[in-house]
Every structure is written in C-alpha cells, then in structure tokens.
Amino acid sequence: MRQNKSWRVREFRDARALGSYMRIAPVAMLVCDYALGEQTAPDIILPLREDLLVISRHVQIIAMTRTIDIAMRGDCVRAGIDEVIVKPMSPLYLEERIRTRLSEGPRGYIAIDDGYVGPERRGRGVIADTRDIPLERRGENIVSFVAHKALRSKADEHLEPN
C-alpha cells in the first residue's frame, strides 16, 4: 500500500504521536491492530473521537484482530470503529476494503453527550433481495411443509404391507 502513489501512508508508533498528528492534519482512513501493546484499539480511538481538537474526529476506522468475541465487538461499537477484519487476511483484501470505504465517502457520524461517538448505525437501510424468484415459488399454489409431510405419511401407510 505504501507503493501506491495516490495514497500517503503514515505509521505511528504510539497513541500520543497519532493524536498529535490528527490535531494538525486531516486523516482519510485509520487502520490499526486491535491489540496495541498494553492498550486496545478502542482505548486509543475513543479519546480521539471525543477530542474536539482532532481535525478528523469522524475518520473511518478499520481494526484488525486474530479473534473477536462479544465483548470486543461491543467495545468496537462503543468506540465507533467502522469495520473489524479478522486476521489472517491478504494485503490485497485489506487494500480492497480501504478502497471500498474511501470510495463510499464519509459516513454520517453522531456524538451523544457522555456517550457514543461514531458512525450513525441507526439508519442502516434494508438491502433488497434482487435474486430471481424461482418459477415454482411465484404462485399461491405452494404446498406447505406440514401438508406435504401429512400427505407423504398417508401415502406411506398405503404402501406398508398389512
């Protein structure tokens, strides 16, 4: 990704350096590992989201981790992490996810006093199912599973020898 001439990739050694940079320059995307030494990604990101001096408070964030559980998922949601990718993954996959997020543009973000700061998750629309409906399922003449089972057991009774 560093070889891509259209991207400027910066690496930060600690949360303090990241916070200092984000106060003076805008950031389009933040990619981080979930486990960062003694801290986790939510521990670092939540203060950045709440800091009014940070220029890109509502930056899109991708976190990477080896495993994920319910508690980690909740922490990521509370910190406003947009996406969690489970390792191992190829660099091409990571690049694809970054390109997709950047092409979609900035998402809506909200900030609630003493609470959640991050992507607007309430307005997620329902994705329409665009798959073709099989011909046999288009009409009202569909036999229910229970009725089909009853007919089949009745037919089996007639086939059994007495």
Image (cartoon, rainbow, N blue to C red):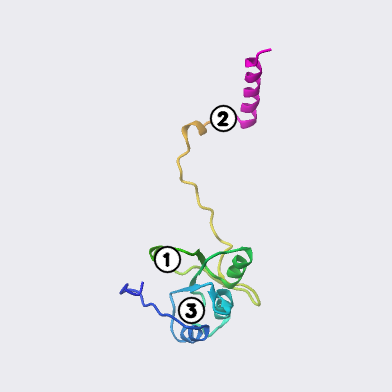
The boundaries of the magenta stretch are 142-162
Task: Say which amino acid is labelled 1.
Answer: Leu
Q: Which residue is mark 1?
A: 94
Residue 150 is a magenta residue: yes
Mark before the other along the chain sequence, 3 or 1:
3
The CA distance from mark 1 to mark 2 is: 45 Å
Q: Which residue is mark 3?
A: 56
Pick the quarter of the image with the N terminus.
Answer: bottom left
- Residue 132 percent across, percent down from the top left: 45, 40
Q: Is residue 24 left or right of residue 145?
A: left
Mark before the other along the chain sequence, 3 or 2:
3
Task: Say which amino acid is labelled 2.
Answer: Ile
Residue count near mark 3 (Cα–Cα under 10 Å), binned few <14, some 14–19, many ≥20: some
Q: Is label 1 in a helix, a strand or a loop? A: helix
Q: Nearer the viewer, mark 3 or mark 1?
A: 1
Of 4 and 139, nearer the camera is: 4
Q: Which residue is mark 2?
A: 142
Residue beneath the point at 62% across and 19% down:
155
Task: Say which amino acid is labelled 3.
Answer: Ser
